[in-house]
Image (cartoon, rainbow, N blue to C red):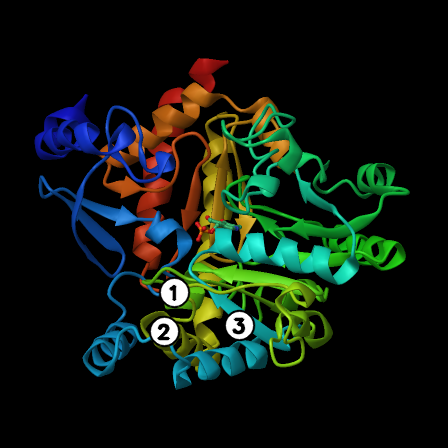
Amino acid sequence: MRYIEATPFSRARFEEARKHLPGGVSYSIRHFEPYPIYVSAARDRRIWDLDGNEYTDYWMGHGALLMGHGYRPVIEAAMSQLREYAHVGLPHEWEVKLARQVSRMVESVEMIRFTNSGTEAAMYVCRLARAYTGKKAIAKFEGGWHGGYDCLHIGVQPPYEAPGSLGILEDSLKHTILLPFNDLEGVERRVKGLELAAIIIEPVLGAGGAIPADPDFLKGLREICDSLGALLIFDEVITGFRLSPGGAQKIYGVKPDLTIFGKILGGGIFPSGGFGGRADIMELLDQVKHPRPHERAFQGGTYAANPLTTRAGYTLLRELEAKPEIYQELNTLGEHARNELENVFSRYGLEAHVTGIGSMIGLHFTREKPRSAAMAQREKRLELAKAFFIHALESGIIYLTPESPLLFISAAHTREDLDRLIEVAEYFAKKKGYSLK
Ligand SMILES: Cc1ncc(COP(=O)(O)O)c(C=O)c1O
C-alpha cells in the first residue's frame, strides 16, 4: 500500500502512542486503518504529516475550522488575550460580548451560557429542559450525535436500540425516546401521549451523514412540540455559524426554544460549547432570581466562558457577521462539488450518492440517496467507503471518516481544491464503477 510506504514516521508514532493512549488516539474516530497520520503542521486548507506528506484537509478540526487553519484575526486576538489574562475564573468582558453577539446573530437566542464542549452543552440543555417542563422524557433521532452524555448516547449507530457505549446504565436511558429522521408520521406515532420534556435534533445530521431535514419535517416538529408542551432543541454544534450567520434555523425559518452550539463558537480553535434560547427558560439558571440552589438548574465549570475561547469566538463571529459573502462562496463551492461528484458517480455507474448543504458534503456508497441515517447505514457498502478513503488519502486528500465520509469545506478552500477532489473521485469511479456490477 502506497500509504504505508509514505508514512513510516506516522506508523512509528502510532506504535508508540498505543503504549500510552488506548488505541493510540484521544478520540476513537481519529483512528483509521492501517494507522492514522500524525500531524506536524497546518495552514489554511492544508495539513502536513510527520513524514512531510501534504494533504488538503476536509476534516477541518471536526468541522470547527470554518475559516481554515491559522486564521489570522482569531490567532491574533487569542495571542493578545494570552498576554493580557488567559484564565481568571471570574466574570470578564469577553463572555458578555460573545453572549450579546450570539443573540444578535441567532434570533432565537435571548440568553446563553457557555461550556467547554458540545457534549457539555447537550448535557446541560437536557437538564434545563427537564427542569423547565417538569417532565422526564427526551426524544432524539436515529443517527443523531450530540456527544457522549449518557442519556443521549444511544441510536447513533446501528443497532440503534443498544447503548452507544459500555458503562451506560439502563436507568440513564429509561427516559430517552428514539425517533425516525425525516419521517413526521413515524415521529407522531412514537410521541403520541408521551410526557415529553424535549425533542433534540440536528437540523442537518452531521455524523449521521450530512443529511438535511426536510423543511416541512422541522416545521412539523415545531407543531408537535407545541401541541405536547415539549421544548424543541436544535443541536447546531456543526451547523451554527456554518450554514449562515444565524445557523440552520435561519435558513429553515423554524424557531427552536433552545439551541446548543460548539466548534465555531470558540473561534474554531479552542474547546467550546454553549446553550441558549428563550429568556424565560434560561432564567431558570439565574442565581440572582433563584438564590436557593435546589430551586434552579445548574451549569458551570472552571473553564466555562474562559477568556481565550470567548474572545476568539467573539472575534470570529464579528468577522462572519460583517462578511456575508463568505457564505455565498462556501455555498457555491459546496454546490459545485456536490453536483459534480454526483455526476461523476453516475457517469461511471458507481452506486454512490452525495448529500449535504452549504459547506457540508456527505458521501454515501449506497444504491439510493439516503434521507436518513438509518437508510444510509442499511444500504452502505462499507468496503467501498473504506477503499475510497485510502484512495483519497493516497491522492493527498483527508476527511472524516472512512466509514461515513463527511467533508467540511472552509473559506480557505478554493475551486481548484474541489476540482481536484472531483478528479480523484472520477478516477475511483472509473476503476470501480461498472466493473462492480
Ligand atoms: C452535532 C453535534 N453535537 C454535539 C457534538 C459534541 O460536541 P463536542 O465534541 O464538542 O463535545 C458534536 C461533535 O462532533 C456534534 O457534531
Is residue 285 visible in this depiction of the protein?
A: yes
The amino acid at mark 1 is Thr
Near mark 1 (Cα within 10 A), the count class, few <14, some 14-19 or many ≥20, is few
Task: Tell me the residue that label 1 is attached to.
Answer: 302
Residue 299: where, in percent of width, then height? Answer: 54, 63
Q: Which mark is residue 133?
A: none
Quadrant in the picture for residue 330:
bottom left
Where disc 2 sits, the SS reads loop
Q: CA distance from mark 3 to mark 1?
A: 29 Å
Q: Percent position (x, y) of residue 135?
A: 78, 52
The residue at label 3 has a CB less than 8 Å from ligand 1 = no
Q: What residue is shown with label 3?
A: 245
* Residue 415 higher or lower than 35, as above or below: below
Please give the name of the residue rendered at 50% of the width and 29% of the height, measured from the top-left corner.
Answer: 167
Q: Is there a contact, CB below 8 Å, between mark 1 and mark 2?
A: yes
Q: Give whichever of discs 2 and 3 has the lower sequence position.
A: 2
Indicate which disc residue 89 carries: 2
Q: CA distance from mark 2 to mark 3?
A: 29 Å
Helix, strand or loop at disc 1? loop
Image spot of residue 40 (x, y percent): 14, 48
Q: Quadrant of the N terminus?
A: top left
